[in-house]
Image (cartoon, rainbow, N blue to C red):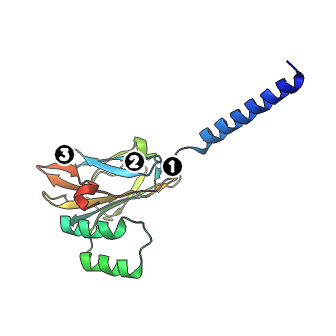
């Protein structure tokens, strides 16, 4: 075999290895999505590849409120003035915030390995709301939302209800996808 052919094959292999290395090095990003399960108080786990930036639990809502807000917000986070007015009509002036956690920014809490029980603040994470004490208990038959903005990945909220003292996720289909 001629040295020109050997050189050409080496170049092809080098390009192939460069492509493989680039594809593997880019990493894979999967949106952060909270999963709520177990007894009441439930356990919040996550799908995704990000690191937890905040955790918000809000409610109680009616299923109708969630359906109406889902129709407005499912297309993205950048809401128009009209969409904000529609959400204000749905929720009014009531404060729905139940619990907010703020992880230590110097530590990266990988969501794929994180498990948080509602009302119990993990080590390295600060409870922001309520400022003192436990959040109010979750009520049977009511609906709740969990938001988990994260570093290095987009996030999607999760919705759940309490049925027979167990947390049950609300599906996109139930919300009118």
At 30% from the left and 68% from the top, the residue drawn is 71
Q: Which residue is mark 3?
A: 39
Marks 3 and 1: which is nearer the front? 3
- Sequence-first tag of 2 and 3: 3
Instruction: Give the Cα separation between the discs numbered 2 and 3.
Output: 22 Å
- Sequence-first tag of 1 and 2: 1
Instruction: Give the Cα separation between the discs numbered 1 and 2.
Output: 11 Å
| Identity of the residue furthest to the left in this view | 164
The numbered mark at residue 123 is 2
The image quadrant of residue 132 is bottom left
Instruction: Give the Cα separation between the discs numbered 3 and 1.
Output: 29 Å
User: 10 Å neighbourhood of mark 3: few (<14), some, or many (≥20)?
Assistant: some
- Sequence-first tag of 3 and 1: 3
Q: Which residue is mark 1?
A: 107
At 18% from the left and 45% from the top, the residue drawn is 39
At 53% from the left and 44% from the top, the residue drawn is 28
Front-most of 67 and 46?
A: 67
Q: Secondary structure at mark 2?
A: loop
Relative image position of residue 37 (x, y in whole percent): 24, 46
């Amino acid at each position: 075999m001629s040295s020109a052919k050997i050189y050409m094959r080496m170049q092809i292999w080098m390009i192939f290895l460069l492509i493989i290395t680039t594809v593997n090095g880019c990493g894979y990003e999967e949106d952060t999505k909270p999963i709520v399960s177990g007894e009441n108080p439930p356990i919040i786990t996550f799908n995704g590849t990000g690191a937890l930036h905040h955790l918000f639990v809000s409610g109680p809502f009616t299923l109708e409120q969630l359906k109406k807000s889902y129709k407005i917000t499912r297309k993205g986070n950048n809401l128009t003035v009209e969409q904000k007015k529609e959400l204000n009509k749905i929720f009014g002036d009531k404060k729905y915030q139940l619990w907010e956690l703020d992880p230590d920014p110097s530590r990266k809490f990988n969501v794929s390995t994180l498990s948080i029980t509602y009302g119990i603040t993990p080590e390295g994470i600060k409870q922001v709301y309520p400022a003192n004490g436990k959040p109010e208990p979750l009520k049977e038959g009511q609906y709740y939302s969990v938001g988990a903005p994260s570093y290095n990945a987009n996030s999607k909220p999760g919705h759940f209800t309490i049925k027979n003292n167990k947390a049950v996720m609300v599906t996109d289909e139930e919300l009118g996808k």
